[in-house]
């Protein structure tokens, strides 16, 4: 941060995606109505069916155990090393745990099915998302920063575009493409570099204290904690502001810019 009583000028705003712009798991009720398995069960079924089609019968319970182990390991790596494994890497590890293999084409089809799953039904945008992005894009450069778990950067771009949101962003930083996830400093430095600003000229908008608030603070920027979908501890947040309804964000940014 610069010296003196005033914070640096706000030149750009970065946005988390899940539970900030999109409502995570909002596709779950729709899947139920459509008679589809929940996504974790569907992924396990797809692995089991792919092996069966390849002529390699395996007990479904073993597929579940291997998948559970890989998911647990992926969460540990994500939370402690700030890396999100790609879907092909996850599938390789599941197959390795089972002592099985799949031909290249079948493995690629399985990965595509995993990665497209959140697009086949569609998630809901947070109320006011398009209006807020449109308003803020008139004054600031905008970027999206997102950790990718099962939906990689290319899928998230399509989801943003499907909701009419992608056009407002000047840069897009996804963990599977960068190699690190929030709160790793490289994520925020990459966003600042893509936008041509310093990290302390950024305000980051997100819903998680550890990933979003602490992440941007570590590089000298400011944070707004969004609780529009879930309140994950706003009572003791270190964010400069809390946004209970996304529609309030332009006013919050205006206040921060005047401080």
Image (spheres, rainbow, N blue to C red):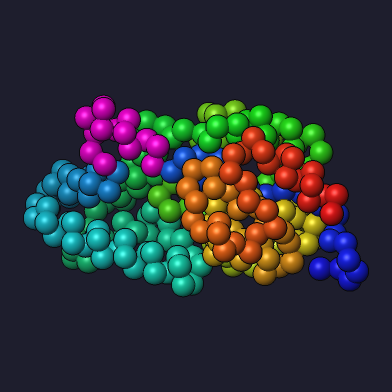
- Residue 23 vs 213, above or below: the answer is above
Q: Residue at x 58, y 48 (%)?
A: 226
- Residue 9, horizontal then vertical, whole percent: 86, 54
Q: The C terminus is located in which quarter?
A: bottom right
Toward the viewer: 110 or 74? 74
**Res 175 quadrant in image:** bottom right
**Is residue 109 toward the left or the right of residue 180 in the image?**
left
| Residue 201 in magenta stretch | no
The quarter holding residue 65 reads bottom left
What percent of the width, then of the height, locates residue 244? 58, 44
Left or right of residue 42, residue 125 in this image: right
Residue 242 at what x, y percent from top left? Answer: 63, 51
Q: Is residue 10 above or below residue 116?
A: below
Where are the magenta residues, as a range?
A: 25-38
Q: Is residue 204 left or right of residue 230?
A: right
Q: Position of residue 243 (x, y in %)?
A: 62, 46
- On screen, residue 28 versus residue 229, left or right, reads left
Q: Residue at x 81, y 68 (%)?
A: 1
Task: Determine whether 5 is above or below 128 in the image.
Answer: below
């Amino acid at each position: 941060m610069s010296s003196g009583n005033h914070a640096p000028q706000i030149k750009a705003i970065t946005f988390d995606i899940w539970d900030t712009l999109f409502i995570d798991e909002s596709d779950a009720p729709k899947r139920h109505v459509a008679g589809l398995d929940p996504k974790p069960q569907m992924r396990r079924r797809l692995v089991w069916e792919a092996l069966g089609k390849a002529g390699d019968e395996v007990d479904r319970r073993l597929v579940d155990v291997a998948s559970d182990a890989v998911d647990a390991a992926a969460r540990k790596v994500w939370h402690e090393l700030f890396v999100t494994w790609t879907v092909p890497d996850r599938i390789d590890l599941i197959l390795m745990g089972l002592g099985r293999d799949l031909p290249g084409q079948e493995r690629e089809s399985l990965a595509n099915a995993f990665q497209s799953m959140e697009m086949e039904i569609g998630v809901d945008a947070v109320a006011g998302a398009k209006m807020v992005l449109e308003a803020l894009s008139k004054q600031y450069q905008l970027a999206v920063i997102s950790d990718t778990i099962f939906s990689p950067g290319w899928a998230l771009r399509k989801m943003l575009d499907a909701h009419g949101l992608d056009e407002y962003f000047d840069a897009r930083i996804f963990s599977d493409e960068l190699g690190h996830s929030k709160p790793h400093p490289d994520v925020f430095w990459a966003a600042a570099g893509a936008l041509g600003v310093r990290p302390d000229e950024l305000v980051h908008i997100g819903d998680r204290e550890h990933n979003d608030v602490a992440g941007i603070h570590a590089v000298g920027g400011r944070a707004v904690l969004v609780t529009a979908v879930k309140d994950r501890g706003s009572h003791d947040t270190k964010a400069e502001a809390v946004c209970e309804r996304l529609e309030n964000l332009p006013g919050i940014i205006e206040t921060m810019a005047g401080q």
